[in-house]
Image (cartoon, rainbow, N blue to C red):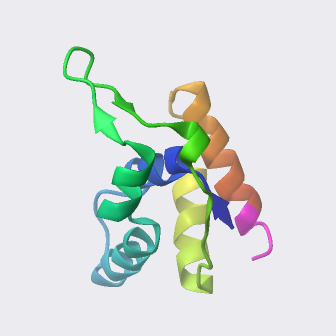
Amino acid sequence: MEMTVKDRLYLPALLPDKGTYKEFNIKKCILQKIALSDAEREQIGLHRVDETGRIEWDTQKETPLAVEFSHEELELLKNSCERLSDQTLPDDMWGTVERIFDACQEL
């Protein structure tokens, strides 16, 4: 699955904030796979704008990250997306949810 910087920034907020120890470890593996390295942050100019609190970067310098998730990771992602279906989220966050859910449909 290819993930943009925006996807990678949104994904931690989409995952459950509590669960079993097994889910904790699966979530930890997912977060390690999508983490933005310091070099990548510098390359795209990722920064927080103090006045607005927004995170910005140069999208022209962004390269999508190809991530392979295990069956267990995809299952947790799918369950997380299904759990969010009745919540109110920004439209661009729904785009991330949709891409993740589509990638999980092979389960």
The residue at 60%/73% (across/down) is 67
Q: Which residue is rendered at x = 33% and y = 26% of the image?
A: 54
Residue 23 sits in quarter: bottom left
73 relative to 18, above or below: below
- Could you tell whether 28 is left or right of 87 in the image? left
Query: What residue is rendered at 42% in x and 52% in y?
Result: 43
Query: Is 59 left or right of 40, judged from the image as shown?
Result: right
Q: What's the residue at 70%, 52% (across, down)?
A: 99
Can I make out residue 45 in this image?
yes
Quarter of the figure with the N terminus: bottom right
Q: Give the magenta range.
A: 103-107
- Between 44 and 31, which is closer to the camera in this rendering? 44
x and y percent of residue 21 in the render? 28, 82
Q: Position of residue 98 (x, y in %)?
A: 69, 47
Across and down, in percent, residue 48 comes to 27, 32
- Quadrant in the rendering for residue 106: bottom right
Q: Is 78 left or right of 84, judged from the image as shown?
A: right
Q: Is residue 36 visible?
A: no
Residue 49 higher or lower than 80, as above or below: above
